[in-house]
Image: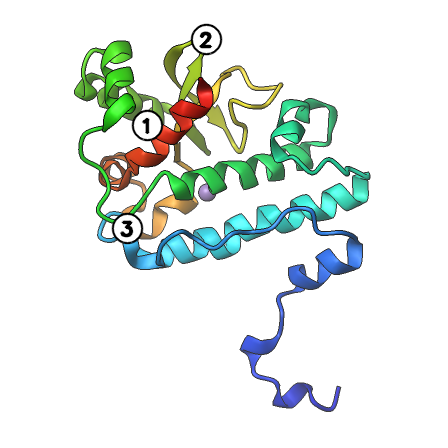
Amino acid sequence: MATLGTIALSQIKPFSAFANSLDGEVLFTLDALPYEFKALEPHIDALTMEIHHDRHHKGYVDNLNKLCAKEGIQEKSLEVILSKVGSYSVGVKNNAGGHYNHTLFWKMMKANGGGLPTGAANDAINANFGTFEQFKTKFIETAKGRFGSGWAWLVANDGKLNIGSTANQENPLMDVSELKGTPILCLDVWEHAYYLKYQNKRADYIDAWFNTINWDTVNAQLKLAK
Ligand code: MN
């Protein structure tokens, strides 16, 4: 106690970091972003990225670990948890989904991204939607049309690509999701993903986000789906 006054605030771990070690084994961890917070500017600002990753995504990971300890879940594969998430609590659904969705979302973006799809992604998008512009129009409509918080997705199912959206932190790998398939591309349309820079203008955020897409990740997900 006597030393507390001499510790800099930055040296004090947030409560959630302690909570994991108190409650039990840490199953899931938060990876660092694969780029700097400012890497996606001017499309997505550094402060939004920092808060989104270090607070929102960290919160999902911390809560998921606490809930796994509390509910006796020892399953180490996030994908397996998602596949039977309907048999767990709503908290597990929200936080397992939150962890999975954000982990994938960070990889869907990169500095100097965007442009036209490359390789197999280009072929698959043209085959399923006609042209990239037609795909983009439909994806934007879907992302704008998700009422409240959620995600827009491009998924692969039975060799076909579909566009859809999910509410809150649900995703196409969940047994409880109407939209099913392997995630190929995802976009977070929760207000926390854009409100600092775009306020209520979700459409502007979606347009700008297209300039960050990492088509290498899209191609990697397409391979996974096969
Ligand atoms: Mn988010």
How crowded pointer 1 is (Cα within 10 Å; few <14, some 14-19, many 20+) is rated as many
Instruction: State the residue at coordinates (66%, 59%).
Output: 16
Q: Which kind of residue does numbered mark 1 sit on?
A: Lys
Residue 141 appears in which quarter of the rendering? top left
The front one of 117 and 120 is 120
Measured in 3D between alpha carbons, the distance from the residue under mark 2 to the one under mark 1, in whole angstroms, is 26 Å
Q: Label 2, secondary structure: give it.
A: loop
Q: Which residue is identified by label 3?
A: 40
**Marked residue nearer the N-terminal end (3 or 1):** 3
Q: Is residue 63 above or below residue 108?
A: below
What residue sits right under mark 2 in the picture?
158
Which residue is found at the position 67% from the left and 30% from the top? 81
The CB of the residue at mark 3 lies under 8 Å from ligand 1 = no
Q: Closest to the observer: 46 or 111? A: 111
Viewed as shown, does residue 56 lie left or right of 216? right
In percent of width and height, residue 137 lies at 23, 21
88 relative position to 147: left or right: right
> Where residue 146 sits in the image (x, y, percent)?
40, 25
Residue 144 is marked as 1
